[in-house]
Image (cartoon, rainbow, N blue to C red):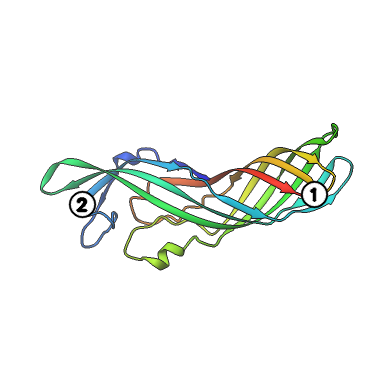
Amino acid sequence: MFFTVKTYPGYQNIMYYNNDSVQSIPDQSCDSANLYNVEPKPALGFVIGIIGNLRLGDHFDFRFTPSLTFGERDLEYTLKSYNDYSTDPEILLVTKNIQSTFVDFPLLIKYKGNRIQNVRPYIMAGAKYSIDLASNAKKKADNSAAHVFINRKDVYAIGGFGFDFYTAYFKFGTEISMSYGLFDILKHDNTIYTQAIERMSSRIFQISFTFE
């Protein structure tokens, strides 16, 4: 799981301030700072779900596979901070952790190739609607720190391929898929951590093992 981040042109030249009226860097003690770099960090997650399958013909299936996904992602910020008593900037490395628990509702079309003995390849494509149940969990737990929040709802385009292996009692499948978030999911605020980001979308690589 990871994010794709698009920043505004010239974001490194914008100065952010902490004073009595403005707290653009609320979790740092510096007087001012500018954002030097922001980099998303991928992380592993875990998915469990069920399969609903409707056979449309010899080669096509319609699939509904609701699932529950647990995971987290990091945004790593490099800041140049300044204080009145210091002429040289201090480099700060700040990591914002974003935890997620998704409830996913994918709708997929599966195209199956010809069966070769007990193996049948397939490709699939579709979309899913996703709800992040943990999008505001940290805000409730700690309001004193500056967090980066994402929207609860998103829509993904899905593509992938796999193989079905037929046994005497069940069908075992292995599948690799990629989910592309279609919307900007970042909750923009007045802090240094979100103002430089024009768009942030979600990406998920998934390896699945199925039993039918």
Instruction: Report which residue position mark 2 lands on.
Output: 30
User: Is residue 93 toward the left or the right of residue 87 in the image?
Assistant: right
Camera sees residue 155: yes
How many other residues sit within 10 Å of disc 2, few (<14), some (14-19) or many (≥20)? Answer: some
What's the amino acid at mark 1? Phe
Name the residue rendered at 83%, 36% in the picture.
118
Answer whether labels 1 and 2 touch (C-beta < 8 Å).
Answer: no
Q: CA distance from mark 1 to mark 2?
A: 56 Å
Which residue is the extreme one toward the top?
A: 116
What's the amino acid at mark 2? Cys
Secondary element under disc 1, as helix, strand or loop, is strand
Residue 11 pos. (x, y %)? 35, 41
Locate residue 157: give its quadrant.
Answer: top right
Residue 178 pos. (x, y %)? 62, 41
How many other residues sit within 10 Å of disc 1, few (<14), some (14-19) or many (≥20)? Answer: some
Which residue is the extreme one toward the bottom?
A: 140
User: Is residue 203 toward the left or the right of residue 95 in the image?
Assistant: right
